[in-house]
Amino acid sequence: MPLRLPPLAGLLALWLAGCDGPQSALQPAGQGAERIANVFWWMLGGAACVWLIMIGLAIQSIRTSAEGPAIRRTRLLIIGGGTLLPTIVLTTLLLYSLPLLPELLARPPEDALRIDVHGKMWWWRVSYPGEDHPGSDDELEAVELANEIRLPVGEPVEFRLTSDDVIHAFWIPSLGGKVDMFPGRQTRLTLHPTKTGTFRGACAEYCGDSHALMNFDVIVMARDEFNEWLAKQRAPARSPSTENARRGQQLFLQSGCPACHTVRGMAERSRIAPDLTHVGSRQTIGASILANDEGQFAHWIANVDDIKPGVRMPHFKMLPDDDIAAIAAFLEELQ
């Protein structure tokens, strides 16, 4: 006989399922998110207490006659349970939550990793500043990505946030709070990831046609793995290894793609569109819309305006399918 859950239990199970996943603020993987989640649960408990009190008062008022000695007791319950107890509960929650604000807004140590993030319509430019090379006058190459952030676990990281067009909001629910990004002004956010894994970030401020498609991936890894990844990202793009990818490189250059995209070591620098130097190593493309593989690259190149309404990249449907596939093979090899 199949198990039948009561309607309330089914709704509760559905509600709890919505709290799961890589973009859940209730599955914290950072110090800031842990504090925010604690505040949420205490606030939920306080709200439940106030709700139960009010429901109890409503039931009491229905059952009590409007005349006689019981009316006085009912009035005392309304004053105590409907006014004093909610005031005490809400004041306690306020006093509990306020001391957490300085912790969430604290600046990181001077030697902490700092990452510049620029909100665009509708993608994210992510920059890891260059560093001085020990024992040399040279500076290590700055690293620029799009729609992907990698962080070392167990260390505070400061994000320096700006916008190039409209107001955006930077938010990684599993790691901490969100901060608005304003044109012409820099805001800052410190996050301290405590667990490795892949998480999802999003724009939390409506910003136009493809606001809902303006997401990004956050990969938290061990410090040694992060250092190895960052060193590879500083290197220029490697040459294609297959005949089809080499043909795709020539088509990429001839089709005018370097006018907007940078591929270090192959094309002049341009900051109009995402840096593609190591695009093949990213987990997704199109601001976390499509998986990163040749087929999805080809789909993106040919149908970008259908996939992402309002995007400023032109489609290349006019190219033959074989040419689009070759360009996709070239991009996938940019590891």
Image: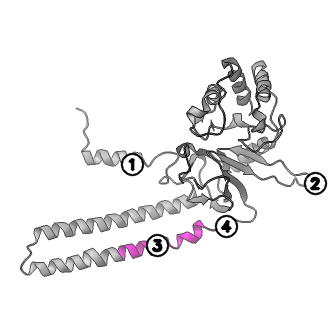
Q: Which residue is tagged 1?
A: 16
How far, Cα to Cα, is label 4 from label 2?
30 Å
| Kind of residue sitting beneath label 2 | Asp
SS at circle 1: helix
The disc, 1 or 3, on the residue closer to the chain's N-terminal end is 1
Q: Residue at x 79, y 23 (%)?
A: 246
Q: Which of marks 4 and 2 is nearer the N terminus?
A: 4
Q: Mark 2 points at which residue?
A: 137
Main secondary structure type of the part rendered in magenta? helix
In this rendering, which labeled residue sits more in front, label 4 or label 1? 4
Upstream in sequence: badge 1 or badge 2: 1
Would you name the residue on which mark 3 appears? 96
Instruction: Give the extent of the magenta segment.
Output: 88-107
| Helix, strand or loop at mark 3 | helix
Q: Residue at x 50, y 62 (%)?
A: 36
Say above or below: 127 vs 111. Answer: above
- Residue 54 image offset from top left, x and y in percent: 25, 68
CA distance separating discs 3 and 4:
22 Å
